Image (cartoon, rainbow, N blue to C red):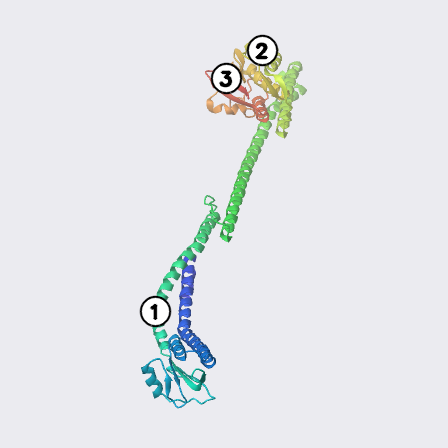
Amino acid sequence: MYLKNKWESIGIKKKLFIISTGIVVATSILIYAALFILFPRIYLHTKISNIKSDTDVLITKMGENPNFNYQQGINEYAYQNGAIAALLDFKGNVIYTPNKFERNMIRSREIEVEPNRDIFRKKKTDYEIAISVYVKSLNKNCILKVNMPLRFKDDINRVIIIIFPIIVLITIALGVFSVLVYSSVISNPLLSINRVARDIAQLKFDNKLKPEGNDEFAELSNSINLISENLEKNISMLEKANEKLRKDIEREKEIDRKRRDFINAISHELKTPITVISGQVEGMIYNIGPYKNRDKYLKETLESVNELNSLAHEIISLAKIEEGVGIQLENKSINELVKEVLSGYEYFIEKEKLNISLNEKNQIFREIDKGIVKKILSNLIGNAVKYSRSYIEISIYENVIEIKNDVIESIDEKDIEEIFTPFYRGDKSRNKKKPGTGLGLYIVKSLIQAHAGMSYSVKCEDNIFEFRLNME
């Protein structure tokens, strides 16, 4: 179990090295063991086959060619086969042998050849041939006696034993070197693939594989790179979708919160005039106190009803904006549109005794929805007329419509954005010093946001209120 766990904890590079080295070493040992066992036997078998073949050739030449020099033939035969050869008669007398030493050896050996019986015999130390042969140049039958020593087998084994460790070490060294190269070639791409795959698992897509060649590793690298790119793209799209969903949810929550605040504000705004109307009508019905003067209080009641009517119209306008304003663009002169709106407020300007100036530095033509822009200008100018102390200044230049008016009380910078909320009048008690629904600037902001190509900015310094409408 320990070895198994140890093996499983080893990296692929070491595993390849160990397995491949083991295979190389085991294969080398098996090859040289087989060589040690088989080589002497194969060599002996080949040597015997060759000497038999050469013996047949020599016998044929001596028996068929009367001019054949049998002495030279025996010399060459003995030299080529490393054997002791002699030609004898049937009495055992040596007719010819290459040297005197061999003559004595042949004489000391017992001759067992019969005319019709040849001998091919392997002994422990040599291989013996004794064969009857007709020598035509001598015109008689003789015996060809051959002894081939077999001591070379032991010499071969000794040589193999001597060189075996050297060859094994060289083979192992070359094998280990080859295995190192092989394991690097195989394992390095795998390690790179594993590293990049681990990064992908951790959603890190910076590292990319560099395929080399057209083999399976290159195909796998290309596939992993493609997976990485697609996964990165899909995750990016998913993150964007999640971010959009988060913003949509936040926007819906904000809209819902504003809607609740708006409903609460409407409830409060409706409560006051309804209470006033109810009290006035009840007083007139029962002739209570000053309400006996019905003509006077009927007029005040009508004003309260008209105020409720205006509020209802503004609420309907807001509902249409929230449902989605249908924009119908047409090329219009902004200057003419400002003049048209101003003409509708001439009576109120004269009534409030306001000084008004219109400065046109250039003509502005834009693709606009006339109804929306006219409503924006009407609410802005109407608000200026309502809350101005003495003058209104309207300037048209470049892409800007600028409306300035002096106010009785300056608005703090932190409260600037509050004036665009529903029913804001600059005081917490909602004391109505000026008539109006309290939705004018809120509608302006909503329409600007609905109409593309417009933005606004507001500031109030030294009792001068300034609204800038940018026609981009």
Mark on residue 163? 1
Q: Are marks 2 and 1 in contact (CB under 8 Å)?
A: no
Element assignment for label 2: helix
**At 46% across and 22% down in the image, what residue appears?**
413
The kind of residue on which mark 2 rests is Ile
Residue 245 at x, y = what percent? 55, 38
| Label 3 Cα crowd, 10 Å radius (few <14 / some 14-19 / many 20+) | many
Vertical arrangement, residue 319 with respect to residue 92, above or below: above
Mark seen at residue 465: 3
- Is 123 in front, or is 272? 123
State how far apart marks 1 and 3 are (Cα).
Answer: 109 Å
| Relative image position of residue 155 (x, y in whole percent) | 35, 75
Which of the 4 image quarters holds residue 170? Answer: bottom left
Check the image and name the residue furthest to the front.
Answer: 67
- Of mark 2 and mark 1, the one earlier in the sequence is 1
Please, what secondary structure does the residue beneath circle 3 have? strand
Residue 149 in view here = no
Side of 228 where 22 appears, left or right? left
**Looking at the image, do the residues carrying marks 2 and 3 touch, with CB atoms under 8 Å apart?**
no
Q: Earlier in the sequence, mark 2 or mark 3?
A: 2
Q: Is residue 434 above or below residue 161?
A: above
Quarter of the rendering containing residue 320: top right
Find numbered disc 1 in the image and state the secondary structure of the residue it sits on.
Answer: helix
Query: Quick one: label 1 or label 3, which is nearer the N terminus?
Result: 1
How far across and how far down the image is residue 391, in percent? 53, 11
Report the Cα–Cα distance between label 2 and label 1: 123 Å
**Disc ID at residue 349:** 2
Q: Amino acid at mark 3?
A: Phe
Q: Are marks 1 and 3 in contact (CB under 8 Å)?
A: no
